[in-house]
Image (spheres, rainbow, N blue to C red):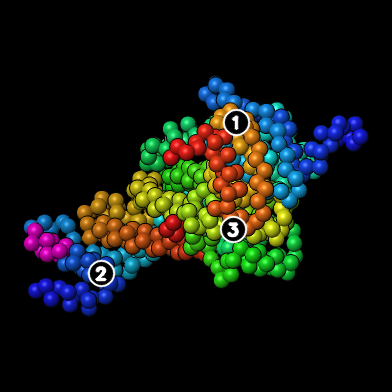
Amino acid sequence: MKEFYKKLRMTFPRKLLPFSAIAVLIVLWHISIARSDSSILPGPWAVVLGIAELAQKGLLLKYIVASLFRVTWGYLLAASLGIPFGLLLGWYQRGEKAFNPIIQILRPISPLAWIPIAILWFGVGDSAAIYLIFLASFLPLTVTAMNAVRNIPAVNLNAGRNFGLSEGQVITRILYPAVAPYLIVGLRITLGIAWLVVVAAEMIAVNSGLGFLIIDARNAGNRYDLVVAGMVMIGLLGIVLDIGMRNLEKMKSIRWGYGGN
Amino acid sequence: MAQGVTTTPERAIETAKINVRGVNMVFKRDGNEVNVLENISLQARKGEFVCILGPSGCGKSTLLNIAGGFLKATSGSITIDGEVVNGPDPRRIFVFQERGVFPWMTVEGNIGFGLFKLSAEERRKRIAYYVKLVGLQGFEQAYPQELSGGMKQRVEVARALAVNPDVLYLDEPFGALDSITRLIMRSELLRIWEAERKTILFVTHDIEESVQLADRVIVMSARPATIRRIVEIDIPHPRDISSPRYLELRDSIFEEIGLAHKV
């Protein structure tokens, strides 16, 4: 028996491990649905058919595009404002002293708590959802950028000044390369948060998107096959986004920040 | 500084490269005033290797930071070639412990860091020269995280020398290295110093290190730091560290600090 395991371990390609785990999960899912009396929860095959049905109606692509559209705008807006703001707060201690308490108070408020106010201000529609994603992404990115600047070793900044760099050169030649790895990690984590929030926002604030699909499929006749189909699509797109961001981390100029040491 | 009006001892001081005059440093901490440096005056001649020796936390690094222009003295002044130190300057480069190298740059990038005003060709030549001087051939494209502590320290020294400064400030540069690497680095530094003849202020708490390296050792007291004694090390390089004169000078410093024959 021991020999058998050893042989199995030797011959089984490592790359197949995650896929075999998924296969096992799907089989377990299938068996438990088949053995239960519930007719509401779908099995894996019903979900595949559900995805096919959505694709056929043209809803799948439409909803994916709608969700990605909102995430892109809310997230980019947050990144383009939050990162410079955070860098400034990190650079100027007085700025941090002034704003840090407000940031710490606002941070524990779930972006979802803002839904009523978002609808009040923007009505039901894209703007409300984009605003919520912006809120969810802005503070984490601000805090990441602020801490990244504060963590630049003083010896690096002093060395820069010692070699006669102007203030502008200190920013481009020391500040930027020193914070880049932290910013990339912060951007990746924040994109994950934005993706979580868009689904929740779409359940309430808009009439399209993957979050809307889930709540609509349930309300319009308990179509739990479509509910799970929506969940599966959210998961798959989430991992695609994460892999995309991970590729940024492989950039040579910022790789130093992730090396062991 | 007008010439001709100075008295004789002052004139001797004016020939000094680095002239520290009556420097006091008081830090305010939690409302308390901590006296760190008390009336420090010392000189270093052009091309001289001066060690500032004192116990940990005595304020010798503070003195070096004032000389480097990173801190402002509470009172007193430091002049270099008669010019008051008012801020960091590429003519005087501060070498930190090896953590001063830029982790996002290769060895080449680090060594060429201060050469941004030169042409690409000139820069390439200088980098190659100093890579060779500190013995890092073959590691030009390596990042600091791939290097040992001693190699990182060489990168820092090469980065400093590459901009051709008059003065090098070294703040316990070998403090984080193992004892064998430290010995190697000392002789490397002496070899480079003999080749380039920079004026060096070298801060250390290691008595042996100071006697091995310096032309003169400034022995400091514990905080608030005052100068206890200045010891001329009149042994030519390379120094035999078991010669009677070496041992005599070393022991006299041990005695000055009150540690002789106690271990």
At 22% across and 78% down in the image, what residue appears? Answer: A11
The answer to whether marks 2 and 1 sit on the same chain is no
Relative image position of residue A248 (x, y in whole percent): 48, 62
Mark 3 or 1, which is nearer the eye?
Answer: 3
Residue drawn 9% across the image and 74% down it: A1
Q: Residue furthest front?
A: B244
Q: Chain of mark 1?
A: B
Q: Residues under labels 2 and 3: Cα distance?
A: 55 Å
Task: Compute the Cα span from label 2 to label 1.
Answer: 64 Å
Q: Which residue is mark 1?
A: B225
Task: Give the residue type at disc 1.
Answer: Ala
Q: Which mark is residue B187?
A: 3
Please state the horizontal and vertical placement of residue B254, each as a whole percent of the image.
54, 39
Q: Which residues are magenta?
A: A28-36
Answer whether residue A35 is visible to the viewer in this image: yes
Specify whether residue A32 is painted magenta.
yes
Q: Chain of mark 3?
A: B
Q: Earlier in the sequence, mark 3 or mark 1?
A: 3
Front position in the image: A79 or B137: B137
The x and y percentages for residue A162 are 67, 48
- Same chain for the residues at labels 2 and 3, yes or no? no
**Residue occupying the point 64% across, 60% down:** B191
Q: Is residue B259 left or right of residue B112?
A: left
Residue B232 left/right relative to B2? left
Question: Which residue type carries mark 2?
Answer: Leu
Q: Residue furthest right?
A: B4
